[in-house]
Image: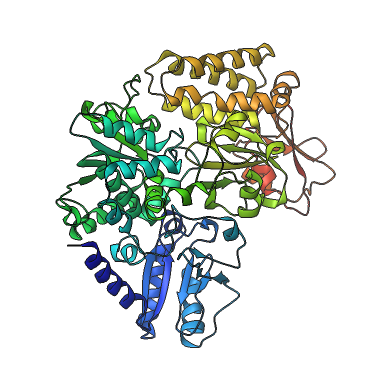
């Protein structure tokens, strides 16, 4: 079956679904939406529509990026604008159906804005200024298409890039990818075209294609959102890569903790086969390519490309010594292209629009766009796709809405546990590979955790070191033993038992690990320590010399007290909530006192003390 025939059929199906006059109800059903009740909202819509005998279609879409508004519902009613409703609950569904679908009252008090489309079909909500800052090419269709219906993707131009690829010479495709300047979006930033060219020129067969979707960074969910919202764009990019280098077998490696992504990928692969976009004689071109989903083992180190290859081979995931690189000797000792899922998704618009179009976005050495996940103390959590080079300040404040409670920004942890902490003073730094590296951080796969004054930077470093140490494969001594020693030193510091000479030891050991570790995980593991030492050394000194935690986070260095003048004697909230018997009891004057030797530093007393009294305080020293 030819592409034009497939597209015509898909477009007809899509238009019949979207333009039949019936009301459309788009509901975000990525993990972010489901986790806060999207499926319950769907069930309630079904009940209400049946109750009033209304004709309306419920369409399950992916994530539009505004996770803080989930469950997000967009109602497309004839002769009305498409209205988006935020944080919809089953209780609010009956109001929407009754007031809007039956009585034409759009319930604007529940609305966040209207859903509109730019000339290139990119969706946006004009009432939210964040969309003005975004440039969506990787996640262009996320949140507006049904990820389980291939017709939606094809009708909007999907697989057109693949059809275009099957005509020119493979050298021409390589030239486009090379000239585009696309770098790997999984963290390392290696030039994609150079990797493909190496594999193409390697005279050894069979060759393999692997998509790395083993996203394990705390606070990162970019790959998951992409696979749950627009799986076909990743698949299309992989087929293009396979045709270019001469591969006939591929794997999409997705961590098993992403069951929805795995399920939707399998559905997408089956649909692609039915449409002659996968399997034998793709689009009657004579090219064959098989693609399988490989659920990962859940190890963070499996995100390293050689460890991932070991995992697919059935071995324990641990890094290999390089060279040789996977492009020359990878899966089953054969040439292998392995790229992040976002990288494959970026291939499609590059093929369609050309290298020059792509190079107009970004900086001199970082072209195109990058997808970031905003988490932590940011007001508007979710994912964003912006041009490389956008100042970090615009990402956090203009797109993310700033800091919760309008507190001051303290730092941004970027690049996951192998990244680094960028202090507020460098908030104008452009977001690209080179600029972040100059600060001691890395862009990584796109996780971005915002920290305010309530964050202890020593504790943050300890948290990420603990994660890295637990996830180390243990193959090389520098990572296995070195990260453990770093963690032990940090654990002593947060208890107030550290020594000033520990700071020099941390610095020296961190540098040794960076230089001696085998893989990227070990080489970047010390980044949280090095950046916090570099920019927040005063907090380390406070923990050591003054035995206090300025952010009042480290349990061993904080205390809770009851202010006698404020405490109401007839209130026993703190006594009832305290988990330790007789830890809070009256003294000889009948005033409540916290026994510091028994106190667990749980903070329950502070939490339950009535605000009108505000009698419990937390202090940053023992």
Image height of 176 relative to 314, above or below: below
Rendered position, 50 above or below 531: below
Q: Quadrant location of residue 114?
A: bottom right
In this orientation, does residue 582 appear?
Answer: no
104 displayed left or right of 583? left
What's the residue at 41%, 57% (across, down)? 30
Which x, y percent locates residue 82?
49, 75
Residue that appears at 72% across and 51% down: 406
Return the residue found at the far right: 565
Q: Could you tell whether 289 is left or right of 255 in the image?
A: left
Residue 298 in view in this figure: yes
Q: Is residue 373 left or right of residue 475?
A: right
Which is more toward the observer, 300 or 445? 445
How far from the left and from the top, in percent, is residue 407? 72, 47
- Residue 470 place in picture, x, y as percent: 44, 26
Tell me the quadrant of the picture where the C terminus can be found: top right
| Residue plotted at (34% across, 19% down) | 321
| Residue 122 in the image, given as x and y percentages of width and height | 47, 63
Residue nearest the viewer, comparing 426 with 260: 426
Above-or-below relation of 169 to 66: above
């Amino acid at each position: 079956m030819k592409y034009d025939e497939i597209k015509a059929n898909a477009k007809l199906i899509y238009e019949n679904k979207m333009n039949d006059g019936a009301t459309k109800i788009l509901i975000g059903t990525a993990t972010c939406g489901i986790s806060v009740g999207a499926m319950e909202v769907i069930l309630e819509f079904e009940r209400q529509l049946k109750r009033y005998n209304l004709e309306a279609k419920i369409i399950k879409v992916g994530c539009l990026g505004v996770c803080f508004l989930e469950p997000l519902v967009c109602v497309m009613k004839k002769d009305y604008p498409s209205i988006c409703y935020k944080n919809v609950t089953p209780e609010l569904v009956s109001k929407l159906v009754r007031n809007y679908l039956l009585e034409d009252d759009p319930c604007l008090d529940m609305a966040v804005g209207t859903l509109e489309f730019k000339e290139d079909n990119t969706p946006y909500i004009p009432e939210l200024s964040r969309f003005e800052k975004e440039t969506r090419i990787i996640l262009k269709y996320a949140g507006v298409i049904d990820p389980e219906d291939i017709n939606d993707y094809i009708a909007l131009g999907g697989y057109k890039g693949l059809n275009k690829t099957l005509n020119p010479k493979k050298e021409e495709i390589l030239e486009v990818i090379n000239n585009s300047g696309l770098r790997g979006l999984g963290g390392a930033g290696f030039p994609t075209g150079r990797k493909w060219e190496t594999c193409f020129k390697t005279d050894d067969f069979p060759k393999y294609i692997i998509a790395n979707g083993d996203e394990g960074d705390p606070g990162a969910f970019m790959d998951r959102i992409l696979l749950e919202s627009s799986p076909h764009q990743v698949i299309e990019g992989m087929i293009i890569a396979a045709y270019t280098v001469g591969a006939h077998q591929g794997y999409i490696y997705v961590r098993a903790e992403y069951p929805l992504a795995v399920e939707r990928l399998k559905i997408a692969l089956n649909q692609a086969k039915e449409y002659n976009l996968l399997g034998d004689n793709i689009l009657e071109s004579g090219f064959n390519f098989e693609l399988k989903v490989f659920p990962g083992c859940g190890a963070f180190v499996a995100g390293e490309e050689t460890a991932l290859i070991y995992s697919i081979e059935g071995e324990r995931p641990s890094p290999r010594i390089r060279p040789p690189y996977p492009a020359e000797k990878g899966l089953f000792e054969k040439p292998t292209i392995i790229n992040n899922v976002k990288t494959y998704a970026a291939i499609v618009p590059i093929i369609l629009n050309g290298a020059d179009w792509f190079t107009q976005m970004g900086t001199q050495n970082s072209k195109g766009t990058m997808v970031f996940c905003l988490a932590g103390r940011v007001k508007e959590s979710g994912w964003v796709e912006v041009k490389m080079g956008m100042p970090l300040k615009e990402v956090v404040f203009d797109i993310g809405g700033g800091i919760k409670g309008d507190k001051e920004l303290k730092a941004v942890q970027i690049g996951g546990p192998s990244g680094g902490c960028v202090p507020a003073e460098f908030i104008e730094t452009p977001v690209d590979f080179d600029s972040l590296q100059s600060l001691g951080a890395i862009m990584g796969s796109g996780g971005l955790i915002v920290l305010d004054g309530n964050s202890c930077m020593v504790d943050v470093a300890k948290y990420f070191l603990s994660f890295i140490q637990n996830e180390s494969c243990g193959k090389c001594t520098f990572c296995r033993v070195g990260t453990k020693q770093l963690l032990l030193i940090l654990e002593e510091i947060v208890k107030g038992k550290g020594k000033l000479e520990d700071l020099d030891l941390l610095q020296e050991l961190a540098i040794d690990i960076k230089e001696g570790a085998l893989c990227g995980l070990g080489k970047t593991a010390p980044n949280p320590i090095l950046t916090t030492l570099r920019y927040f050394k005063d907090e380390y000194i406070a923990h050591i010399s003054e035995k206090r935690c300025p952010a009042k986070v480290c349990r061993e260095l904080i205390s809770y007290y009851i202010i006698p003048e404020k405490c109401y004697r007839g209130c026993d909230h703190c006594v009832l909530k305290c988990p330790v018997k007789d830890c809070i009891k009256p003294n000889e004057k009948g005033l409540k006192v916290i026994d510091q030797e028994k106190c667990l530093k749980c903070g329950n007393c502070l939490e339950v003390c009535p605000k009108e009294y505000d009698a419990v305080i937390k202090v940053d020293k023992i």
